[in-house]
Every structure is written in structure tokens, then in C-alpha cells.
Image: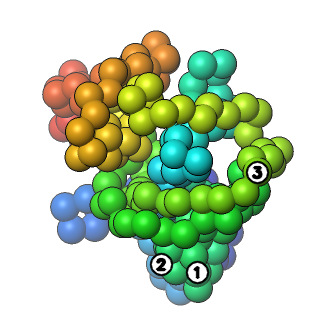
Amino acid sequence: MHFRFCPVCGAELVVAWLGDQQRQCCDRPRCGHVFWDNPVPVVAAIVEHENNIVLARNAAWAPGMFGLITGFLERDEEPETAVIREVAEELSLDGEVEAFLGHHNFRIKNQIIISYHVRARGEIRLNEELVEYLSLPFDQVRYWPMSTGLVLKQFLEDRGYHPEERPLPAAMQAQMDRLNAPRTPGPGGDGAA
Ligand SMILES: [Zn+2]
């Protein structure tokens, strides 16, 4: 994330070294606001419904891409409450948290993803964020080799399944490759840019 103006006083932000990291800062002495760019928490649900796993496609995603049910926390909301709310909003299902599965850093989006296994009941109706869903027996679920896909892989392996990998779309794979590439200093630069 990158901002141009200070959200406190409206001055143009500058980039400065604070400790060993570059940060966007406001250099007006009376303000001095720092944009820390901390990761944002997100909850994710592996939804178990009628003995199947439900994966959904977001309206913004390419055809063929399906994922877990995810969403941001509201202020003052506990993660367990948020994940149940997201399952209710997006699938119209009544859920309960079966287990906390772990958390991981999703660097592409600067998010910390907090994952749960959620058992859900009811009839699936998608909200406007989603365009289609899959309801698959555990042995037919494929995982994507990134972020929540790896949580899903672990979840299935822990239950004795051997899920197949579904390749990432080319554009996303290229983004992952860039993030994972070794950093090399540019000509005359210090490698920090
Ligand atoms: Zn400022």
C-alpha cells in the first residue's frame, strides 16, 4: 500500500529511514505521522457443509478460481465471530467454529490470514460478492499452492487425503515468482528500492 498524502494533516508524505526500514512519513514537525503499513488481519473459513467442502468464486476472480470464505474483521470483533459472520453473509449458512487452523502472512496483500474449520448448516445462497460455488467431497477437493490453498492442503492431509494441486492463474504465479525472487541491487542503487 502506498499513500500520497498524510491522513492527519494533508501534507505530502515523504519516504524516510526509521530504524532499519523505509517508511512513508509526514515531515511537518507538528504532525510527524508515520504510515507503518502493518499487515491487516483477515479471517478465512474452510466450510464443511453436508459432508462436503464449500469453495466459492469471488465476482472479481477469473472463471475456474475458487477459494475459502474470507473477510475483514470489524472493529471490536473477535476473529471467531468474524468468520461465522462472513459465512452467514456470503453463503447464508449458520456456522460454528470447529477448530482454529493457524495463521500466516499473505505477503502479496500485506495480510495476516487467520484460518478456521467451520461446520455450517442451512441452504446455500450466495451474496453479491460471490458468483458461484463448488460443494465437493473431501477426496475431490484440489488446493492452490499459495496462502489459504496451503491451509486447505494441510487440512486435507491431516484427515488422510492426498489432494491434487490446481495451478495458479499465470498472472498470479508471476506475482508470486517476483515476490520470491532473490533481491539484486539495481545499477548504482543500494538495493532497497
Ligand atoms: Zn501530517
Query: Badge 3: how crowded within 10 Å, few (<14), some, or many (20+)?
Result: few
Kindly identify which numbered label has been placed on residue 52: none
* Most distant residue in the front direction: 50
Q: Nearer the viewer, mark 2 or mark 1?
A: 1
Tell me the residue at 42%/36% (across/down): 138
The image quadrant that residue 163 belongs to is: top left
Q: Is the CB atom of the residue marked by disc 2 within 8 angstroms of ligand 1's nearest atom? A: yes
The residue under label 2 is: 32
Cβ atoms under marks 3 and 1 closer than 8 Å: no
How far apart marks 2 and 1 lie (CA) works out to 30 Å
Tell me the residue at 76%/33% (across/down): 131
Q: In the rendered image, is residue 149 in sight?
A: yes
Q: Helix or strand or loop: what does disc 3 sit on?
A: loop
N-terminal-most mark, 3 or 1: 1
Location of residue 132 in the rendering, given as x and y in whole percent from the top left corner = 72, 31
Q: Nearer the viewer, mark 3 or mark 2?
A: 3
The image quadrant that residue 154 belongs to is: top left
The residue under label 3 is: 123
N-terminal-most mark, 3 or 2: 2
Relative to residue 131, is residue 44 drawn left or right?
left
How far apart marks 3 and 1 lie (CA) works out to 26 Å
Q: Is residue 40 above or below residue 148?
A: below
Location of residue 69 in the rendering, given as x and y in whole percent from the top left corner = 58, 49
Q: Nearer the viewer, residue 22 or 88?
A: 88
Q: Helix or strand or loop: what does disc 1 sit on?
A: loop
The residue under label 1 is: 77
